[in-house]
């Protein structure tokens, strides 16, 4: 009896050894297959994120932003700076400055704080109606009509064009690097029109 039990246990141990060998071999084959697939995989990275205050996601494929994304970011920057009332400007300024390139931050902040003092004194408000956006890489020109009111009186209604230059941060988001008013001839140069 003892001999039969011994042979049975010996046979079970041999089977366990073979099962573990098969499992180890299968594990090695799977790891080699996964390693090969990883090495042959195209290095494509796609990041989809929702920019501040925007409600439509856009894609970033292999570090390249879509024109639609740049257009939305440009119009967001325009709305934060050119659509204001004395009551809303301070909040908009703080929100806007969170997305400004560090090299531009201090100069732009000082300029906008001085502008805020004028806005409060004059009770000035502004509305910008976007009509067209031209995009080239991380650059955009936003064209539209700007209405300025002092108190309840219409002060001006003018066609304006704003140049926006964006820079890409290491985390994939963009920051404002340049923001200035441009002329109609600057748009022609920007778009390559004659």
Image: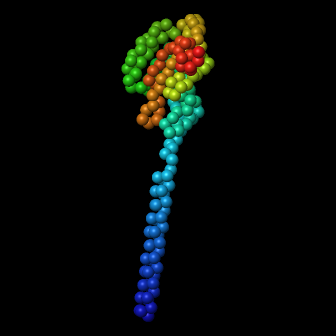
Q: Nearer the viewer, residue 182 or 88?
A: 182
**Hey, which quadrant is residue 191 in on the image?**
top right
Q: Is residue 166 visible?
A: yes
Q: Residue furthest front?
A: 194
**Image quadrant occupied by the N terminus:** bottom left
Query: From the viewer's perspective, is 156 left or right of 169?
Result: right
Give x and y (percent) for residue 10: 42, 84
**Hey, which quadrant is residue 127 in on the image?**
top right
> What residue is drawn where x is 58% and y is 22%?
133
> What residue is drawn where x is 46% and y is 61%?
32
> What residue is drawn where x is 48% and y is 67%?
26
Q: How many marks?
A: 0
> What residue is drawn where x is 38% and y is 23%?
103
**Image quadrant occupied by the C terminus:** top right
Give x and y (percent) for residue 90: 46, 19
Give x and y (percent) for residue 184: 56, 12
Q: Is residue 28 above or below residue 152?
A: below
Q: Is residue 133 above or below residue 49?
A: above
Q: Nearer the viewer, residue 26 or 146?
A: 26
Query: From the viewer's perspective, is 169 left or right of 158?
Result: left
Q: Is residue 76 visible?
A: no
Query: From the viewer's perspective, is 58 left or right of 4?
Result: right
Its colouring scheme is: rainbow
Give x and y (percent) for residue 35: 46, 56
């Amino acid at each position: 009896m003892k001999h039969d039990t011994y042979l049975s246990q010996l046979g079970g141990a041999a089977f366990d050894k073979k099962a573990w060998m098969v499992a180890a071999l299968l594990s090695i084959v799977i790891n080699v297959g996964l390693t090969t697939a990883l090495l042959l995989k195209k290095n494509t990275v796609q990041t989809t994120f929702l920019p501040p205050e925007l409600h439509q996601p856009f894609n970033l494929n292999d570090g390249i932003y879509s024109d639609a994304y740049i257009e939305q970011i440009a119009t967001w920057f325009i709305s934060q700076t050119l659509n204001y009332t004395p009551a809303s400007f301070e909040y908009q300024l703080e929100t806007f400055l969170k997305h400004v390139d560090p090299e531009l931050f201090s100069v732009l902040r000082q300029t906008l704080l001085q502008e805020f003092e004028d806005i409060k004194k004059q009770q000035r408000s502004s509305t910008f109606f976007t009509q067209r956006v031209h995009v080239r890489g991380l650059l955009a020109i936003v064209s539209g009509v700007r209405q300025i009111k002092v108190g309840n009186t219409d002060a001006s209604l003018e066609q304006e064009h704003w140049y926006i230059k964006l820079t890409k941060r290491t985390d994939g988001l963009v920051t404002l690097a340049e923001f200035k008013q441009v002329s109609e001839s600057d748009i022609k140069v920007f778009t390559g029109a004659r």
